Image (cartoon, grey):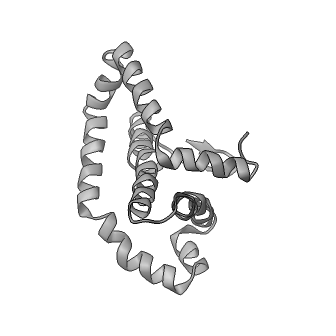
Amino acid sequence: MGSTKVGVLETTFADETEEDLFGEQAVLVGGLMYLIKNGFDVLVENGYPPELAYFEVLHEMKLIVDLVYSSGLTGMLKAVSDTAKYGGITRGNIVIDEGVKKRMEKLLAEIKDGSFAQEWTGNPEQSKKKLEKMMKEIENLEIEKTGKKIRKLAGLEK
C-alpha cells in the first residue's frame, strides 16, 4: 500500500479493505461531514448568519486539515492561537468522546463481520435508491445552499 516514492507499507488485502472502509465511514467522509453539518446547524439555530457559520465550520476546515497533513496534530496546534489550542484541547473531547469511540468500534465490527457489505451489496437496486434519496437530502441542506452561494462568490464554483 502506498507510493514507492514516499514509502511502501506492508499490509494484507483484508486489513487495507477494512481500514479503508472504516476511515471513510467514521472519519474522512461520514465523520467529517456530520461534524461540519452539526457545527453549522448549532451556529445557525443559535442565531448566527449561515454565511458566517459556513466559513467557520467548513471553509476554515481546509486550513486546519492542511496544517495537520503537513505538520501533524502538534504542528497544527503550534500554528493556531493559544486560545484555539486551549479550547480545542479542553473541549474537543467533550464533542468527540468515548461514546463516539464506541460507536466507531461498532462500525468497524460491522465492516469486519460483513454486515456493511451485505447492507450495501445485498440488494443493489434498493441500495442505489436509498443512496440517491440520501444524496438529495444532503444536496438540500442549508449548509449546501449557503456553500453554493459562497463558492460562486469566491469563484470556486460556477
Q: Quadrant of the C terminus?
A: top right
Q: Residue at x 50, y 37 (%)?
A: 139
The percent coordinates of residue 128 (x first, y second) are: 41, 20
The N terminus - image quarter:
top right
57 relative to 128 in the view: left or right: right
Query: Is 42 situated above or below 120?
Result: below
How far across and down, in percent of the image, does residue 94 sit? 30, 70
Number of numbered labels in the structure image: 0
Residue 124 versus residue 39 in the image, above or below: above
Residue 17 picture quarter: top left
| Residue placed most toward the observer, 102 or 144 | 144
Q: Is residue 8 visible?
A: no
Residue 52 in view, yes or no = yes
Residue 56: x and y, percent? Answer: 54, 65
Q: Looking at the picture, does residue 46 appear above or below residue 33?
A: below
121 vs 156: above or below: above
At horizontal 49% and vertical 80% (from top left) the residue drawn is: 85
